[in-house]
């Protein structure tokens, strides 16, 4: 029987096939003594917590015991992609614990945005999904903004209990954890990996005081986000890194906007009007007549319409059409893991995206 080698840091079975999966170690290190995986190595040497994506089921199994533990939950979401980064099963996971909703990446939204309104919007939308929050904190982990507000909120609510940080992949949870470690512990090598019964990939604990810890849990993979349709290289193009510049297009009925070659919106009816686009500044937006759009998509995929960089990576047969009407108020058409288009009332549109990617019509955040 082959012996399964495990990481001495986190207990994950060691493997050298997939650098993004738990327990990865380069093959030449695999059979050394006392091997630690890439994630633990980076944690130990660079104080850098790496998200290892678990799919929803693994994640739920890992967190099933959490409902019985004492403590509070810090649920990190991406304010730029709230619907895409919201974990639908969160209520079931956390039981009756108090929840602080932390909206990260505030620096991506236009500077003129009304923060009070964004907080209200987040609280209301979370409630719509069945989540009552004790507090909503807006932060930018990248820019070090709002971290003190978050620590104050945590200390007010936790009552000397443990703190569990949960979130999906790509919400910036790792960056936030590292900022919290810096603030609360001030040293780099205090982070340990803890044994958490019944899990392969353990939670990482950060001491808060003599008796309680902050636990970082692995990021959940949300299969309905565009981020899981693209390659790592294309991810750099579609994930915004700085404040998103609004791009406004005046459209007539029967015109289409392409977002690279991975999504498009056909404007059906509602008279000449503006579509205000909020996407990564790196993502190319192309306007054309809807009657030419299918032909263009087929012939220019990976060229004029990029990403994808390689047309073989994108299956045009695997695309769905989502029909939407904005009704009587300004709405955002949200493409999960990509961005959103703000459209005034009285418009009909068709959004075309890969079949597993979610499209949501919501009250405008702007």
Image (cartoon, rainbow, N blue to C red):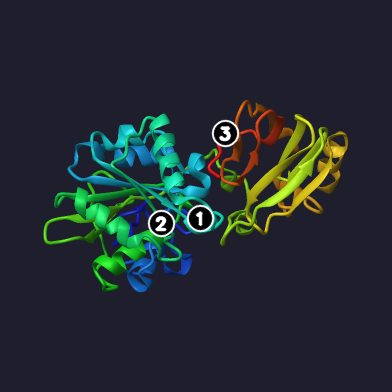
Q: Position of residue 109 (x, y in %)?
A: 54, 54
Would you name the residue on which mark 1 appears? 18
In three-dimensional space, the C-alpha distance between marks 3 and 2, rounded to whole angstroms, equals: 24 Å
Q: Is 166 on the left or on the right of 278, as rendered?
A: left
Question: How many numbered badges does the structure rendering display?
Answer: 3
In three-dimensional space, the C-alpha distance between marks 3 and 1, rounded to whole angstroms, equals: 32 Å
Q: Say which element carries label 1.
A: loop
Q: Quadrant of residue 175?
A: bottom left
Q: Say which element carries label 2.
A: loop
Given residues 23 and 287, the one toward you in this image is: 287
Q: Is 358 on the left or on the right of 293, as rendered?
A: left
Q: Is 207 on the left or on the right of 52, as rendered?
A: left
* 302 is higher (above) or lower (below) than 66: below
Q: Of circles 3 and 1, which is in front? A: 3
| Residue sitting at x 28%, y 67% | 183
- Which of marks 2 and 3 precedes in the sequence? 2
Would you name the residue on which mark 3 appears? 360
* 154 is higher (above) or lower (below) than 315: below
| Residue sitting at x 47%, y 49% | 78
Image quarter hosting the C terminus: top right
Given residues 27 and 323, the one toward you in this image is: 323
In three-dimensional space, the C-alpha distance between marks 2 and 1, rounded to whole angstroms, equals: 32 Å
Q: Position of residue 257 (x, y in %)?
A: 76, 43
- Which of marks 1 and 2 precedes in the sequence? 1
Would you name the residue on which mark 2 appears? 139
């Amino acid at each position: 029987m082959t012996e399964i080698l495990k990481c001495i840091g986190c207990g994950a079975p060691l493997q050298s096939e997939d650098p993004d999966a738990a327990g990865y170690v380069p093959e030449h290190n695999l059979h050394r003594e006392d091997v630690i995986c890439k994630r633990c190595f980076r944690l130990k040497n660079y104080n850098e917590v790496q998200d290892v994506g678990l799919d929803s089921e693994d994640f739920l199994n890992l967190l099933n015991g959490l409902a019985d533990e004492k403590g509070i939950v810090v649920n990190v979401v991406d304010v730029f992609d709230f619907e895409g980064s919201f974990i639908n099963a969160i209520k079931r996971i956390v039981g009756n614990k108090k929840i602080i909703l932390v909206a990260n990446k505030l620096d991506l939204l236009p500077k003129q945005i009304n923060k009070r309104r964004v907080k209200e919007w987040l609280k209301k939308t979370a409630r719509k999904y069945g989540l009552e929050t004790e507090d909503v904190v807006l932060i930018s982990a990248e820019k070090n903004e709002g971290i003190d507000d978050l620590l104050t909120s945590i200390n007010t609510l936790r009552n000397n209990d443990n703190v569990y940080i949960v979130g999906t992949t790509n919400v910036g949870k790792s960056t936030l954890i590292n900022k919290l470690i810096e603030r609360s512990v001030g040293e780099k090598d205090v982070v340990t990996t803890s044994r958490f019964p019944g899990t392969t990939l353990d939670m990482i604990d950060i001491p808060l005081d003599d008796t309680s810890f902050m636990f970082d849990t692995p990021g959940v993979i949300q299969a309905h986000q565009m981020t899981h349709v693209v390659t790592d290289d294309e991810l750099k193009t579609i994930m915004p890194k700085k404040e998103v510049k609004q791009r406004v297009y005046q459209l007539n009925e029967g015109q289409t906007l392409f977002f690279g070659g991975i999504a498009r919106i056909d404007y059906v009816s509602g008279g000449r009007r503006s579509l205000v686009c909020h996407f990564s500044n790196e993502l190319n937006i192309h306007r054309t007549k809807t009657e030419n759009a299918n032909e263009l998509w087929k012939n220019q995929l990976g060229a004029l319409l990029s990403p994808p960089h390689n047309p073989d990576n994108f299956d045009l047969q695997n695309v769905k059409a989502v029909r939407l009407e904005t009704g009587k108020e300004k709405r955002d058409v949200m493409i999960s893991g990509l961005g959103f288009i703000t459209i005034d009332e009285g418009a009909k549109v068709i959004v075309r995206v890969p079949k597993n990617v979610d499209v949501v019509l919501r009250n405008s955040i702007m």
